[in-house]
């Protein structure tokens, strides 16, 4: 149950910001096709991943890989580690930038980054159980707000913009489309780390993934339906602008964008904590002598300091692009390899009993 | 991972850090009574091509709210606002602007950059209403300042649906204008305001905006049709006929489109529910219905002809043809297809009730 | 007098309340020794004599009498002295070194069972626990009325032996929890456990927790219901409340007395408490954030009236809030200290003069007073005084963060508080553990 909620909220935090911009600029019409393709790929890989993990009850990824051999460890764990580090860096920098654009123009970037990373470090330091329980608490507090605003964002929608429904596959090679996979593959790896602590039913995770589908679809379509394709292609964060256009008369607050985005930011903090924790797990496996908390502090400090080297948004975009390669490698390699190894071990087990 | 027990030194360092932070941490703090909150932003261009910005500011002084108007000139809007802020004792915050007024001259020159500037910045919300001032902006604001009835949110209430709004006033927000600049198939109409003789404001019609420029003007009655096509409620609108005056209490629309050989054809039927308010002389319901439908369809045809001439599609008719026309061709909607549009519009009138008195 | 008595007298004779009396019981000369502040001598002697007579009238040997009265011990002076300190009566046979330790009729030193002083009950049982641990255990036994209740007693403490009791219902309670508590007590039996901090240290809880791990209650009904739910109750002698372990987050909102109302009302009341905790955490931070950092969130009219209310206030909103919160804390603390006769006067001074006059003198804005009043009232809707004090602490952190970062800081503060609550656990059972079984109806 906790795992399912964690899955939902870490994805929600990623969906509403960058994903619509990327998908909208990847194709002119028929946006449902890129969304569908992405969702289908996501589902396939999650199923393979979970099936593979089910062959190794109570073990997490690191132990699985390390148990098989050093070569596999380097082949798989090192990229995963690198990927996590880059995600931490990119997410922190990108979201701090977004916060500066949308909320507070005067607060310097380092202060916002400090806030985000210190809270994430604090949560990660307390351990996996804390992360999941905090996820439960936060979803109770903030999910109603998000769902409410999501439904009111339909206020300004003109359904006729849906219409050119036919689509072609040209978007697949477009760079922005590949970058949009950020929203998909960021989240599912944690399922592999969670095994020793919480057990989960595979079906619930699939239900959670299904629950997310309308959010994926509409986060792209609401800007398109409100503004039209041509206009939303000119905006940087189309969904945010669409939410900004909502007019609720009876509420005490004027700009609901802020509440929406802040709820998502709280989910992002949790997401950062989760990724930090995963990274530390990998590190402690190979450096068991240093205390985990110190490693965590060192990692956070390193990430924070390297954020200063990223000067502006163009650099963030570059990093994004480089990370995309890594992301695809991990998206494909990790589930398949786990599945493959799992099958092999099961077959070996069967052969032995025969 | 086990949670670490805090040793005695850590809380002290944390407290010191926090103390340091609070000393330097007040970057964004500016108390609300040290900010000026303008409600209306007026824009006009002067002879040098610079922008002159008018801000109608509401100030809480003692127990009531006083209104004053300040102006500033600058190369761009932000520059002009900055000039004003420089000269005022509080800092100007555009966060609560509700209405933006643009002088007619500026609108006819083109507002594309102004609108894009507002959409880009976070300060002005995209759902701010926009209106065009038919008078000289200086004159408009100086009459307003002298008027005694100026309340704080007066102009905003003019547009509020639950305050002074009327179905003949077009309600357009900045994001809709921005959308129309980039859209292939849709344009907007912006209300034209002036100061009134006895009331504070007077609407003299609406301006038709194509690609950020004002190209045409339509009258108040035609604005009603514009609102009807935009699915705004026309409830409360009073129509005057030769023999009666009626109030519209509801409307719905059925549309049927056809496209043959680059010639679009539109057949629409608008159902209106009315109540009879006053009659003149001897009338019957059939006569009222006939008069009303005749009046409205005539008005509609003339408006459509005017719009087709200036190639501005404020009724959003292009939207209806998205299923028929390919997206690449849709770019040419305004220039090729729209002027050739033939329409057949019929009004179906339903007299719901006639009040306390009967008519035959 | 013999050596035994001389030794005891040497040790205890300086005490003004040490009572030494000669008596005759069943034709034996005895010395009665004890503290007359702890023993009701008159009644005890009456009992003794009656007992002696009944035995003698049945012609049984006097040995039976001695054994029937109490423990017969030979020669151990130290044990006699420590028994006297415990409040027992020593019956010493003259010219021998035999004595009997008897449980006498004690002096009435405990409060009678009364209404609870710190918890108010509407529509529920009005008895409460007292200082005597035996009385408390007796009340619990009477309510539980089951054969599965288990009571473990310990004597903790270094210089003063304090009695500690652990109660649980066999079959319902989590045996890991029970065993951990028991092991910790036994391991640390030398530690002083006469207040909650000492007890927490004895049980191995970290001392820097902001939230108390014990759920204290004066109501027997509440304690017993929790026993039935599988929790463990601790009693400490001389502390008039039951300590329920483990304390959970949901206990801040739910007390057993709610079940005396119909179900929809119970859910509504619990919902109000949840809203209360949210208001008390968020409102001061929200005020600071909306007034200083992010005023675009307010509707225009509201923003204007807030600006109007702040006209003339000399310092920023953050300082204003801290100033008034500090004054409120001072008033709250002072009203606890004051005797009941002066209390209302000071409340009037604090409330009316400080509040109203501060607004009139333009030191604070009147909107702020409303916000603070709302916060304080909402703070008191939480069950358990120790919990409401903890929540009072958290809101300061949120105010500081909100002042620096605006509403982002408010949300970050909430995340931080949530994470802190999620990280607390009692012997592995998390603070946020929700009992999702069917016999509980949760309000949300």
Image (cartoon, coloured by chain):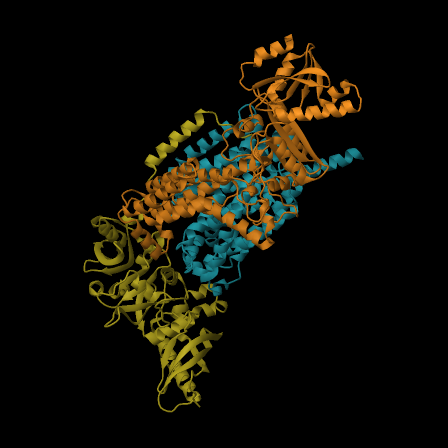
Q: Nearer the viewer, residue A201 or C115?
A: C115
C99 is higher (above) or lower (below) than C180: above
Q: Which color is chain A depicted in?
A: cyan
Residue drawn at (51%, 47%) of the image: C274
The quadrant holding residue B346 is: bottom left
B260 is higher (above) or lower (below) than C183: below
Q: Nearer the viewer, residue B322 or B4?
A: B4
The quadrant holding residue C141 is: top right
Q: Position of residue A315 (x, y in %)?
A: 41, 41
Left/right of residue C156 with respect to residue B70 in the rendered view = right
In the displayed image of the protein, which residue is found farthest to the top?
C3
Q: Position of residue C312 (x, y in %)?
A: 26, 47
Left/right of residue C35 with respect to residue B91 in the rendered view = right
Q: Which color is chain B depicted in?
A: yellow
Q: Quadrant of the N terminus of chain A?
A: top right
Q: Which color is chain C depicted in?
A: orange
Q: Position of residue A292 (x, y in %)?
A: 53, 28
Residue drawn at (66%, 35%) of the image: C168
Q: Quadrant of the C terminus of chain A?
A: top right
Q: Nearer the viewer, residue B355 or C385?
A: C385
Q: Position of residue B316 (x, y in %)?
A: 42, 69
Q: Is residue C13 visible?
A: yes
Q: Is residue A81 visible?
A: no
In the displayed image of the protein, which residue is found farthest to the left?
B47
> What is the total number of numbered labels drawn onto the structure image?
0
The quadrant holding residue A199 is: top right
Residue drawn at (29%, 42%) of the image: C315
Left/right of residue B216 with respect to residue C221 in the rendered view = left
């Amino acid at each position: 149950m906790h795992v399912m909620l964690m899955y939902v909220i870490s994805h929600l935090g990623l969906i509403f910001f960058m994903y619509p911009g990327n998908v909208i600029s990847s194709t002119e019409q028929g946006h449902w096709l890129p969304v569908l393709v992405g969702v289908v790929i996501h589902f396939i890989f999650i199923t393979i991943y979970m099936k593979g993990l089910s062959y190794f009850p109570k073990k997490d990824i690191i132990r699985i890989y390390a148990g098989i051999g050093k070569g596999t460890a380097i082949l798989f764990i090192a990229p995963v580690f690198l990927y996590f580090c880059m995600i931490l860096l990119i997410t922190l920098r990108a979201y701090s930038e977004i916060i500066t654009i949308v909320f507070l123009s005067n607060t310097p970037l380092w202060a916002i980054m400090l806030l985000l990373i210190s809270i994430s470090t604090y949560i990660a330091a307390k351990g996996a159980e804390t992360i999941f329980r905090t996820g439960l608490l936060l979803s109770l507090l903030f999910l109603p707000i998000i769902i409410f605003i999501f439904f009111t964002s339909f206020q300004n929608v003109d359904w006729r913009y849906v219409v050119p429904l036919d689509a072609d596959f040209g978007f697949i090679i477009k760079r922005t489309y590949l970058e949009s996979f950020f929203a998909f593959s960021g989240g599912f790896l944690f399922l592999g780390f969670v095994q020793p602590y919480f057990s989960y039913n595979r079906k619930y995770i699939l239900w959670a993934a299904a629950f997310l589908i309308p959010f994926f679809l509409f986060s792209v379509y609401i800007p398109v339906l409100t503004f039209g394709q041509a206009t939303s292609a000119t905006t940087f964060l189309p969904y945010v602008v669409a939410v900004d256009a909502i007019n609720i008369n009876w509420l005490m607050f004027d700009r609901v964008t802020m509440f929406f985005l802040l709820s998502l930011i709280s989910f992002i903090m949790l997401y950062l904590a989760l990724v930090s924790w995963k990274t530390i797990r990998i590190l402690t496996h190979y450096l068991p002598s240093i205390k985990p908390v110190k490693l965590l502090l060192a990692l956070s400090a390193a990430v924070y300091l390297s954020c200063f080297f990223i000067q502006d948004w163009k650099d963030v975009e570059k990093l994004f692009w480089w990370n995309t390669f890594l992301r695809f490698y991990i998206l494909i390699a990790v589930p398949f390899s786990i599945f493959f190894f799992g099958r092999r071990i099961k077959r070996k087990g069967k052969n032995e009993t025969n | 991972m086990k949670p670490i027990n805090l040793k005695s030194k850590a809380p002290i360092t944390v407290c010191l850090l926090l103390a340091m932070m609070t000393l330097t941490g007040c970057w964004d703090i500016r108390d609300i009574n040290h900010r000026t909150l303008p409600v209306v932003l007026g824009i006009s261009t002067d002879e040098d091509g610079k922008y002159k910005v008018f801000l109608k500011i509401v100030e809480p002084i003692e127990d009531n709210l006083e209104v004053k108007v300040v102006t500033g000139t600058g190369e761009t809007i932000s520059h002009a606002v900055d000039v004003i802020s420089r000269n005022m004792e509080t800092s100007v915050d555009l966060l609560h602007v509700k209405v933006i007024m643009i002088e007619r001259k500026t609108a006819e020159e083109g507002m594309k950059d102004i609108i894009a500037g507002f959409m880009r910045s976070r300060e002005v919300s995209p759902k701010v209403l926009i209106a065009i001032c038919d008078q000289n902006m200086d004159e408009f604001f100086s009459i307003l300042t002298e008027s005694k009835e100026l309340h704080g949110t007066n102009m905003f209430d003019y547009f509020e649906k639950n305050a002074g709004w009327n179905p003949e006033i077009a309600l357009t927000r900045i994001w809709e204008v921005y959308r129309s600049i980039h859209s292939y198939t849709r344009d907007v109409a912006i209300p034209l305001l002036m100061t009134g003789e006895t009331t504070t404001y007077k609407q003299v019609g609406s301006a038709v905006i194509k690609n950020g420029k004002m190209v045409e003007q339509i009258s108040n009655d035609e604005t009603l049709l514009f609102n009807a096509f935009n699915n705004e409620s026309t409830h409360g609108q009073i129509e005057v006929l030769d023999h009666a005056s009626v109030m519209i209490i509801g409307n719905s629309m059925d549309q049927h489109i056809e496209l043959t050989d680059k010639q679009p054809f539109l057949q629409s039927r608008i159902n209106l529910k009315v109540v009879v308010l006053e009659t003149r002389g001897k009338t019957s319901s059939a006569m009222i219905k006939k008069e009303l439908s005749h009046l409205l369809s005539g008005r509609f045809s003339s408006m459509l002809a005017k719009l087709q001439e200036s190639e501005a599609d404020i009724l959003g008719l292009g939207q209806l043809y998205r299923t028929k026309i390919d997206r690449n061709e849709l770019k040419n909607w305004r220039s090729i297809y729209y002027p050739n549009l033939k329409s057949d519009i019929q009004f179906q009138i339903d007299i719901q009730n006639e009040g306390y008195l009967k008519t035959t | 007098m013999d050596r035994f008595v001389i030794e005891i007298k040497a040790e205890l004779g300086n005490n003004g309340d040490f009572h030494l009396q000669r008596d005759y019981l069943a034709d034996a000369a005895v010395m009665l020794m004890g503290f007359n502040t702890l023993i009701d001598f008159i009644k005890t002697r009456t009992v003794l004599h009656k007992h002696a007579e009944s035995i003698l009238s049945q012609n049984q040997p006097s040995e039976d009498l001695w054994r029937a009265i109490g423990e017969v011990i030979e020669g151990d002076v130290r044990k006699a002295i420590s028994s006297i300190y415990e409040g027992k009566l020593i019956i010493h046979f003259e010219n021998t070194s035999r004595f009997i330790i008897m449980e006498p009729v004690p002096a009435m030193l405990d409060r009678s069972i009364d209404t609870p002083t710190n918890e108010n009950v509407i529509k529920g049982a009005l008895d409460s626990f007292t200082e005597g641990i035996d009385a408390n255990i007796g009340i619990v036994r009477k309510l539980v009325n089951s054969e599965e209740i288990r009571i473990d007693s310990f004597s903790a403490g270094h210089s003063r032996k304090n009695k500690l009791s652990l109660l649980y219902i066999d079959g319902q309670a989590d045996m890991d929890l029970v065993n951990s508590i028991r092991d910790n007590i036994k391991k640390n039996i030398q530690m002083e456990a006469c207040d909650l901090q000492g007890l927490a240290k004895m049980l191995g809880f970290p001392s820097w927790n902001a939230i108390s791990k014990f759920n204290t209650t004066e109501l027997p009904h509440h304690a017993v219901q929790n026993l039935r739910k599988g929790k463990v109750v601790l009693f400490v002698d001389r502390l008039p409340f039951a300590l329920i372990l483990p304390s959970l987050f949901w206990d801040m909102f739910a007390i057993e007395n709610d079940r005396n109302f119909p179900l929809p009302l119970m859910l509504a009341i619990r919902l109000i408490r949840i809203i209360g905790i949210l208001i008390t955490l968020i409102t001061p931070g929200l005020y600071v954030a909306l007034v200083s950092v992010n005023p675009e969130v307010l509707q225009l009219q509201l923003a204007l009236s807030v600006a109007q209310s702040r006209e003339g206030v000399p310092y920023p909103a953050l300082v204003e809030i801290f100033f008034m919160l500090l004054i409120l804390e001072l008033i709250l603390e002072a009203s606890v200290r004051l005797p009941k006769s002066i209390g209302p006067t000071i409340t009037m001074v604090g409330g009316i003069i400080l509040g109203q006059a501060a607004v009139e003198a333009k030191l604070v804005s009147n909107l702020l007073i409303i916000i603070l009043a709302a916060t304080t009232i909402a703070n008191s809707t939480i069950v358990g005084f120790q919990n409401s004090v903890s929540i009072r602490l958290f809101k300061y952190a949120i105010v500081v963060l909100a002042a620096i970062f605006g509403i982002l800081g408010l949300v970050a503060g909430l995340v931080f508080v949530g994470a802190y609550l999620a990280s607390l656990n009692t012997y592995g059972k998390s603070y946020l553990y929700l009992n999702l079984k069917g016999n509980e109806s949760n309000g949300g």
